[in-house]
Image (tube, rainbow, N blue to C red):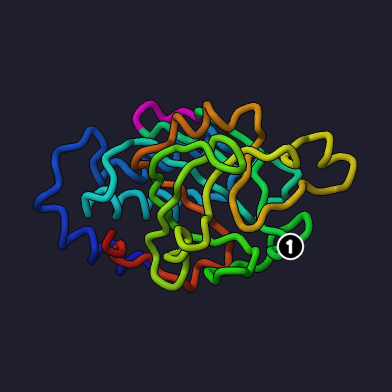
Amino acid sequence: MTALLLLAVATATADVPASPLTRPELPALESALIQEATDLHPEALHAALSSWDALRAQGEVQSALLSVIDYELPSTEKRMWVFDLESRHVLFHELVAHGRNSGDDLAVAFSNEDGSYMSSLGAFVTGSAYDGKNGYSLHLRGVQANVNDRAEARAIVMHGAPYVDEEIARRQGRLGRSLGCPAVRPEIARALIDEIKDGTVLYAWHPSIASASFRTPLPR
């Protein structure tokens, strides 16, 4: 995965505008962020930062915001983080649901297929916010071929859901589950979506994604 990322970055950096975050600073940034998010698996943060760096180098994103979902953690734990990479602080640390066919409390199966009702892994670029059947929601564009590139066709979006609730988690031993969308608490959905909309990176991680290397982003 590292070799592919470096290759992708090397071929694109010539046209990338200057940024307050430079590639040599990434190891120090990663170390600082893991101190801010001690429950997050370091491998998840490393994969997310590497993907953000590649997408930035390829001109896909300009924002220094990065959202990470760690699907190795159970649904009863807060497993989504939103980082401000410039200030090196956590802006949000939240519960997030997975797809009903991905697993019970633990997500163990993932899919890119329509009708699977499973979550997808990998790097997404956030789009616009809109009001839909699940209330205030956020378009997500999957940028990894055969991993999450059907997200838009599957209507995989971020939205609030009443089954994302700590009391429900305590009562039934897990959160409610979505049809594949990363659903969050209704109380924070609007604020969270407004923070990360319009061209930031969201990375959904699980150990099983290690075999799916990051590729050059798909054309829009």
Say if 36 sits above or below 2 in the image.
Answer: above
* Of the pair 156 and 208, the residue shown nearer to us: 156
The N terminus: image quadrant: bottom left
Q: Quadrant of residue 87?
A: top left
Q: Is residue 81 left or right of residue 49?
A: right
Q: Give the mark count.
A: 1
- The residue where tag 1 is placed is 103
Residue depicted at 44% across the width and 56% down the height: 47
* Of the pair 41 and 168, the residue shown nearer to us: 168
Residue depicted at 65% across the width and 32% down the height: 186
Check residue 49 for magenta coloring. no
The region drawn magenta spans 86-90
Secondary-structure class at tag 1: loop
Residue found farthest to the right: 171
**Residue 3 placed where, x, y %?**
30, 68
**Residue 74 placed where, x, y %?**
73, 51
**Residue 163 placed where, x, y %?**
75, 42
Q: In this view, does 197 lie to the left or right of 102?
A: left
> Given the image, on which type of amino acid does mark 1 rest?
Gly
* Of the pair 140 and 12, the residue shown nearer to us: 140
The C terminus: image quadrant: bottom left
